[in-house]
Image: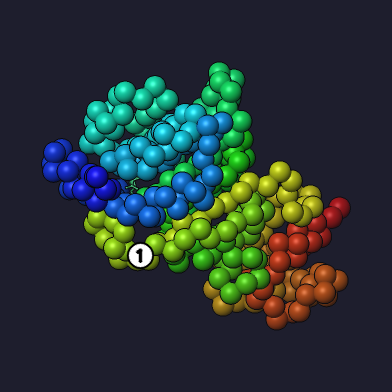
Amino acid sequence: MNNVLDDTKFIMKKYNIKANKSLGQNFLIDDNVIEKIIEGSNVCKDDLIIEIGPGLGTLTEVLLEKAHKVISIELDKKMIKILEDRFKLYNNFELLHNDVLKVNLNEIIQKEKKDSNIKNVKIVANLPYYITTPIIMKLLEEQLDLNSITVMVQKEVADRLIETPGGKNTGAITYSVFYYATSESILEVSNTSFIPEPDVTSEVIKLDIRKTPPVNVKDKNVMFRIIKCAFMQRRKTLLNSLTNTKVFLNKDEGIKILNKLNLSENIRPEKLSLQDFANITNEFLKE
Ligand code: SAM
């Protein structure tokens, strides 16, 4: 029986493919990892799957068997030819030759939901690592009609994305993910599971999109701007960062607000919960 490694080598030879590093091409060759991604994303016949960066079609093939429909978005023209040949007999496959960051995902999802009996919309992907953050932010901030996002990312990035705000891996993006989704780790993946091997360890994570946000804040966009200001200068206290960026009028006002919210004057931004940032935002927006 063919396995993914043999299939990958065969396709690469047949089409004379050399992985394009600048497009983040590291092809999965590990059957066990593919199985875990499919299991973790819980793909079923009611699902529309949007796959980002199908590459040679390794994950795509399994997704096509399990889902109602798969829409794959791929930037590399060489991959498009392979994917068109490989899946021409599937009538539940659609391929978009485009940069995922430029695609109107909302339009695609709304159209598919109108035209067929799709119950869930899920993102499943082994992401190109050079644009992990912009892709995740696009998927979350556009508030698409999504149920979940199951993606392979660098382990170091995964640590930040699925951390609970206040935990040791907290960064500005931790708060965004936490606002829009609950998250979990599915599996750590060694670099030997890819051709070519990436320099880093990877991790598959799953984000389940929340139906309602976990905090009450007067304006979430203002909150995210404040979080950005708080994390702009490394190793500075929250008080200094928010004073320097004029979120607090001056240090005295900042101290008053922090005292009122039971936060220490010396606290660092990464120690705050999302609720703390919501409280600061609500104070900032007070008439
Ligand atoms: N899914 C395949 C696999 O698991 O073997 C390939 C994954 S590879 C890590 C990332 C894929 O994303 C590549 O096929 C690459 O060409 C594609 N890609 C890179 N930048 C992209 C972009 N901006 N939009 C869509 N696809 C992109």
Kind of residue sitting beneath label 1: Ser
Q: Residue at x 32, y 63 (%)?
A: 191
For the question of whether residue 107 can be seen, the reply is no
Q: List the single residue furthest toward the bottom.
A: 266
Display coloring = rainbow
Q: Residue at x 79, y 49 (%)?
A: 218
135 displayed left or right of 23? right
Residue situated in front as seen by the camera: 67 or 139 = 67
Question: Which secondary structure, mark 1?
Answer: loop
Q: How many marks?
A: 1
Circle 1 is placed at which residue position? 190
Residue 189 vertical placement versus 266 (above, below): above
Residue situated in front as seen by the camera: 144 or 268 = 144
- Percent from the top left, x then y, of residue 43? 51, 40
Q: Residue at x 15, y 38 (%)?
A: 15
Quadrant in which residue 248 is drawn? bottom right
Answer yes or no: disc 1 within 8 Å of ligand 1: no
248 displayed left or right of 114? right
- Percent from the top left, x then y, of residue 83? 29, 33
Which quarter holds ligand 1?
A: top left
Q: List the single residue furthest toward the top.
A: 115
- Percent from the top left, x then y, of residue 64? 41, 33
Q: Residues within 10 Å of mark 1 (few under 14, many from 20)?
A: some
Residue 29 vertical placement versus 192 (above, below): above
Q: Residue at x 35, y 37 (%)?
A: 61
